[in-house]
């Protein structure tokens, strides 16, 4: 019953937004990606959509998938996130905050391990038009839970 009620509320909300043509004019689609080859192969994609408010603030959501392989050890990471961006006027700097809940399956010749972990990233990036690059830091980083080697990670974003 709760799922039906939640679905009904979401449907009403989306219908209301779709009837206002201005809403979709302020939505940008894009996200980030990562590629790495050599001793370790990593391929990641993070599509997202954000709504631009007229004060330099954007809010949206995204999904993430990352595949990583080192020898016979593979990791599949997938998750969802809430993204907030703030464009500082006239200086080309974009501040970001992002909450992400990730799930990972790590597999080797001995079996597999499933883990899940939250991340709360704060970052800054140089933004030039549709492209932004910089760094972010995970304030919830726990080396015993995360599949990432460091709480620091690069930001590479495109929005259209």
Image (cartoon, helix red, strand yellow):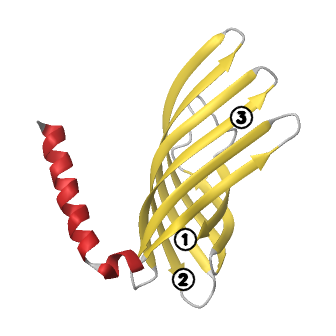
- Among the 4 quarters of the image, the one containing residue 26: bottom left
The residue where tag 2 is placed is: 88
What's the residue at 42%, 63% (across, down)?
A: 60
**How far apart in space, not on screen, are marks 2 and 1 (Cα)?**
8 Å
Mark 2 residue element:
strand
State left or right for residue 107 relative to residue 11.
right
Q: Are marks 3 and 1 in contact (CB under 8 Å)?
A: no
Q: Are marks 2 and 1 in contact (CB under 8 Å)?
A: yes
Crowding around mark 1 (Cα neighbors within 10 Å: few <14, some 14 to 19, many 20+) is: some
The residue where tag 1 is placed is: 95
Q: Is residue 141 above or below residue 73?
A: below
Q: Nearer the viewer, residue 13 or 40?
A: 13
What's the residue at 49%, 31% (across, down)?
A: 116
Can residue 142 be spotted in the picture? no
Q: Is residue 109 above or below residue 61?
A: above
Image depth: mark 3 or mark 1 in front = 3
Q: Looking at this view, name the residue that lies furthest to the right.
A: 38
């Amino acid at each position: 019953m709760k799922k039906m009620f939640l679905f009904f509320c979401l449907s009403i909300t989306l219908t209301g937004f779709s009837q206002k043509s201005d809403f979709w004019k302020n939505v940008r689609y894009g996200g980030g990606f990562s590629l790495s080859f050599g001793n370790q192969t990593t391929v990641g994609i993070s599509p997202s959509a954000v709504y631009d408010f007229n004060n330099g603030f954007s809010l949206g959501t995204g999904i993430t998938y990352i595949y990583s392989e080192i020898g016979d050890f593979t990791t599949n990471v997938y998750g969802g996130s809430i993204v907030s961006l703030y464009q500082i006027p006239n200086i080309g700097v974009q501040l970001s905050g992002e909450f992400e809940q990730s799930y990972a399956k790590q597999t080797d010749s001995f079996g597999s391990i499933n883990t899940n972990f939250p991340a709360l990233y704060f970052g800054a990036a140089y933004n030039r038009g549709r492209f932004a690059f910089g760094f972010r830091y995970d304030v919830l980083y726990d080396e015993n839970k995360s599949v990432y080697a460091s709480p620091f990670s690069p930001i590479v974003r495109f929005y259209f």
